[in-house]
Structure formats: C-alpha cells, structure tokens
Amino acid sequence: MNNPAVALYCSDAKCQAANDLKHKFCQACSTPLLRRYLWMIGGDVRDVAVGTLLEERYQVCQARILLDTKPAAPPTPPEEIPEAIAPYLKLIPYRLHLPQVYGIISLPHRSTPTWLLEYGTLPTPPDFSTGHILPSLLQQWPHATAIRQLNWLWQMAQLWDPLENQGVVSSLLSPALLRVQGQILKLAELQGDSRPRENPEVLTLSHLGQLWLTWQASASPLIRKFIQQLAEALENGKISDSHQLVYVLDQAIAQATQARQQEHHLCTLTDAGPSRSHNEDACYPPHNTRQSLAQGENSLAIVCDGIGGHDGGEIASQLAIEALQESVKPLLDQSPAQSPELITELLETAISRANDRISQRNDSEQRQMRKRMGTTLVMTLSHQHQMFCAHVGDSRIYWITRSGCHQVTLDDDIASREVRLGYALYPDAVSYPNAGALVQALGMSASTRLYPNIGRVIIDEDSVFLLCSDGLSDDDRVDQYWVTEILPILTEKRDLKAVTDRLMEIGQTKNGHDNITIALVHCQVQAKPAAGSNLITLPPLHELPAPSTYQNTHSTALLDEPTEPMLKLKPRLNWVQRSLLAGGILLGLVLALGSLSWLMFPEMRQQANRLLGNNPARPPVASPPSSPPSPSPTLPQPTQSIRNVSVNQWVVFDRPLELYPSPNLLGTPQNIPPETPLKVFRRVTRAEDMTWVQLGHCLLSPAPDEANSGEVSLPSPETSPPDSPMPPNEGELEEALNLGWLPVEPATDAQMLLVTIVAPVTDCRPD
C-alpha cells in the first residue's frame, strides 16, 4: 500500500513535518505519527489505484478506505448539512458506538461531495481484506465468550431509543452495518428508516429479537436458551420497551460475571505546569498516590480542574473533591450488588451537593459573574463488572483496551453544542472563536441548572481508564501517545506509576500551558479459581419494571442536554419553565420595588415618560405653580404575541426578560426590567421551529467582562444566517441601542410572551 511519493505529516500542529509512511515517530520532533483511517459514504474509488493520493491529502487504502496523511490540518467542511447527515451530529453523545463525520471529499466522477467517517485511532492498521476498517460482529460472534456476547446485545439495547428517535434504528437490524472493536459495538454507518408509505411495517423490538434468534446457534452454550427465551418475550410483547430489555440483559450479565473477579489499581499525579504560578487542579486519591484494591472493593477516582481566570479555582476543586468523597463513601464500603439506577441516582445527588457547596461559598462571599469560582469534574466509580463515569465541563475520561482508545466523555463546551444542534461538524466547530468556552461547570449556578453526565460501561476484559484535565488532553496528546505509553500497561505489564510519570512529562513538555492532573485506573479481569459455569436464565418476567421506568444508563449519554436523554433519573424543568419560574419571582420583586420607587422618586417618572414618548425629548418648560400635575401614563394591557409584531416596531413587555448576545442561549444574558421600550430588529427561525427575536433597548450596556483564560462561558460570535443583514443605520438613536436576542418557543412563549405596541422612542441618550 505504501507509496514512496506519499508522506505522512506529523499530527503535532507545531511541527507538521513530512515523514516516510513506514516511520512510527516523527523524525523531526519524535511525536508518534497518528494514522487516521476514514470510511467513505456516498461514493467510492474502485477505479483508483491503491496508494493514490486524493486532494493532495487522502491516500487510497481500499475502495472506500482512506488514510489522512495530514491529520493536523482541518478537513474540508461542507457548505450545509444535508438531512441524511444530521443524525450523525445529533447523536454525537453516542460516539462510542457511532462514527463521526470528519469532512467531505470531491471525487472526479461525482457531482456531489462524498462524506468521510472516522472511528478513532487504532493500535495497528486495519485488515483491508475485510472490506472495512473494523471487523464484522458476525465474524467475531462465534469466537466470543458468553459475557462478551451479552455485552454486545446490551449495547444494542442501549442504542435502540436514541436511534429510533433520529429515524435510523434500522441500522441496528442490518448485520452488514454491525461492527465491533473488541468489546465495544460499533456501527459502520447510519441507515435511514423507510417511510411508512414505502414500508408500512413499523420497526419494533420484536424485530431485534428475531435478528438475535438467528445468532442463537453460534452463541455460547451458556446463553443459547436465554436468547431463545428473550426473543420469544420480545415477540409476544412481554418485554415491551428497551428499558425493560436493558434490565433483563443486566440480570443476565450479572449471572455470567459471577465466574469473574476484578482487581483495580490506581495512580494519581497533579502539577501546576511550567507556565502557571499555582495549581487550581485537584484529584482523588490525593496527589502521588498508588492504590491497589482487592476483589470486591470499589475504586473511586476524581479529577477536578478549577476554572481558569476565576478567583479561587483551586478552592472550588478541593471543595468538590471533599464533597464527592463524603457522598460516595457508602458505595465504597458496601460490597453487595446495587442496582445501576440506584448508583446513578446517588452519583447525581453527590454531584449536586458538590455544586451547591461551591455555589453557597460563592454566595456567602458575594462573588458574582466571573468572580465566582468553579471547577470541572470527571469521576469513575467501579462496581462489580461495571464502571460508572460522570463528568461536568471539559476534563476527559478515556477508555483504553487492547483494541483501541475511546474518548468516553463529550466536552461541555460551545463546539460540542453546535454539533449536537446539527449546525456544524466537530472538526469545523472547534475552530470557532470561543469554541472551548464551557456551557456548564460546578459551582457557577444552582443545581437546578446543572446537568451532570452520568453513564456506565460493562468491563469484560483488562482495561485502563485515564482521567485528565485539559493540560494533558489538549492538542490530541492522548490520541498521539496512547499506543506507545498507555497500551503497554495491558500488553507488557508496564508499571502504572511509570506510565503516570511519563504522561505528566508529555503534558509539561508538549503542552505546558496549563495545570496538569492525571488519574489512571487499571482494571484487571480474570476467572475465579475453581469457578464453574452455569447456564444463564431469563429472570421472572413478572419482576420486570414498568415500561420506561428502568433508567437507561450508559457512557455514551454523557452530555449536559442530549438529544434524547437516557440518564435523567428525575424530571427537571426545561429552560423555558425555569425562565418563567425565575421571571415570575423576579417580576414580583421588581414590581414591588418599582412601585415604591415610583412613589418616592419623581425623577424616575419623568425619565420613564420621556422614554415612552409621552414627554418631549428634552425637559419641558416648567408649568406654572397653579397648574395641576399631569397624571402618570397607564399602559394598555398586552394583547399581541411577540411573534406577530412587525420589524421596526417598538414594544414593551409586562415581565422581565433575558436577552442573549447571540442565538443558541450562548453567553451571559442581560436582564431587562418590565415595561422597558424595545425595538424589534429581526427574527430568525432555527431548529424545531425555535424563533429568535433581536431586540434593541436604551439601557446602559453592562461593563465589559474581565479577561479570561478560555475556560469560561463567553458570548459566542454572531451566528445569524448571512441572509439576515442588520437594518441600516438610522442615525444616532440606532447607534445608542443595545441589541440582544430573545428565544421564543412555539408551544409556550408564542402565547405567553405578550406585548404592548408603543410609540417610537425618539431619543435614548442619557440626559
């Protein structure tokens, strides 16, 4: 396959030197060379010789497999996202199982672009003779253990609901699309479901049971009867939804793992880094700890990264560690099995308590805005054959097995949110200004506004979990070095402390711009001595939980607000409900204070009358003493929805508002008091018929925020469509207006956000 004329460029953005394809390390900077293999959909290159370079970048390895020879360079983004590609973006929380859209390539014989999918980094080049980057599940199924076969079925059950909601659940029923990477189920690509008029038969779980029944003959003898019973229960409707199916498979896996035992070894390090004066990170177990846990003991690892640029980040990190350790301690002391939903709920409660402890400290010290201290969080908790993973912010968890390195978490930042909304590919979104700004962190607000990401994976082979702050993960350092530095823990029994020290050295020398914190958790799985093997049986179906009550907990749902949340164990108010609740409370306070101020300060009445156009723009000539005072104006009752108001009209609301710097709820909103004159500039309709209305007002602009280090939530750049230009300048008044965006949901705010149309404001300059 190697073409002497083709070079593989270093993935280090500071180097990008050309190297011979046979080299494993960059000859200029010694960075391990990153080989990223891509799968083509919507086209192939059967008529192009293997080894050919396309677009001076992509080497042809097979008809639909390419090697990106310039992994540090951004791929070509599309001009727009077609309907068929949108599910890949909206399902990015499930990236552990689904390929991610990398970019596009133009082929000579096609008028439309061909899409490139990527599956992460591999320890060795793929076997191109199989026709795909990853091996087929059907090829691996007969050779797998009973635990692994159940694990694959469990992952398929976890994926059913999110794929069904995106109209691509038929992907799980196509054996040609089912791939595996060790114990992890993968989909080669997504397949759209047939429309009812094309295929009136609705896909249900019974179809999944029928597919599994075809695998029964080649399944492990321990689970053949179980698969038959399971398929029958799905066929006759005794198992009616995916949550019940996950429950049944959990019970079967628990039976199968009774013949296994696990040991855990942990090692932690934290350092300020070469360019920071102090360390805002914290970890548990504490810095420079080595810990070995015997069979039956649960491991706990935590990494927190204090928000850069916020005073007291190190205090927030330590408060979070202490609060989490206290809350989770009962699970570490208990060896009996606990249900996954109970553990998930306990972790969610623990994270909320940690958040409230930091938030209350902020409130007691009267910290506001960027003065508030906060922290990110990543945490792993082992329990029998499972590893529970939780995170908030942009610190990361990586899962390393002999077959691959998998980023389990998805950063809570603006770039990831743009992808989840279907607006951009991830390689393109990370290049946006403020792409790394966080959308949530511990301590920045009340727990009612926090969405911790909690999930779990089944461990059926030796694995390593890496928890780290972005001082290590930035610039793809884990992708570059996991094969040479972390994989030897599994393949060569390399010392865990030596690997931790080496990763710290990489973070300091290759990055060096931030604090660095690392926690490694080595999970060792082996058969119990003299343990027998028992047939797996279906649990009594009368003990099944009610449909949709068993919580679907899985690592790929680690997201603050996923498209279809799998892990929310108790209902939360959505942002509209929270805004209305907060607005109602604020409205009561504002009205009470406003009424008192209106009576006590006549200057305020004069200013309000002037802004509403009821008085001349400049102070009028004083009336004779004998003239009675003019009554204060009374506004008519609101009668129109904001969605029906024409552009360039002036309106007032009878409630307080929050105006955002740009669409998408990004940035810090401005609080607008009720009855403030606002001018309607334009409307933009986004996904799901969400309408954004741009309003201008005459209130003083907030003071500019102080500098930050890039780890806090900042207003994003203007993201309105180019075909929505700003209105022309209409003079000094237009220049004085401050602009903001109001979100309007069709089912709620369209009827509730009522306005009164008022006379145009002629002057909004201060007196």
Image: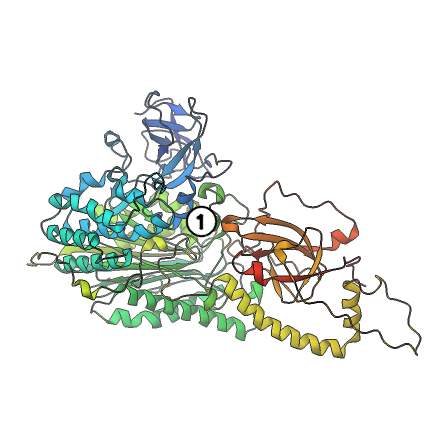
Residue 124, given in percent of the width and then of the height, sits at 27, 37
Left or right: where 39 falls relative to 184: right
* Residue positioned 9% across, 49% down in the render: 221
Numbered label tally: 1
According to the image, what is the colour scheme of the structure?
rainbow
Q: Residue sitting at 64 percent across and 73 percent down?
A: 590
Looking at the image, residue 511 sits to the left or right of residue 388; the answer is right
Q: Quadrant of the C terminus?
A: bottom right
Q: How crowded is mark 1: few (under 14 residues within 10 Å), some or many (20 or more)?
A: many
The amino acid sitting under disc 1 is Arg
Mark 1 highlights which residue? 420
From the viewer's side, name the closer residue of 713 and 205.
205
Picture quarter with the N terminus: top left
- Where is residue 749 drawn, in percent x and y? 56, 60
**As drawn, is 61 to the left or to the right of 393?**
left
Closer to us: 17 or 636 = 636
Q: Can residue 373 be seen in this view?
A: no
Q: Which sits in the foreground, 295 or 159?
A: 159
| Left or right: 504, with 720 as reference point | left
Mark 1 residue element: helix
Residue displayed at 36% across by 54% down = 557
Residue 628, by quadrant, is bottom right
Question: Which image quarter: residue 603?
Answer: bottom right
Residue situated in front as seen by the camera: 734 or 410:
734
Spot occupied by residue 249 in the image (x, y as percentages of width and height):
21, 56
Against 544, is 364 above or below? below
Residue at horizontal 47 percent and vertical 59 percent from the top = 440
Find residue 245 and report its horizontal and vertical position in percent: 24, 56
Q: Is residue 600 visible?
A: yes
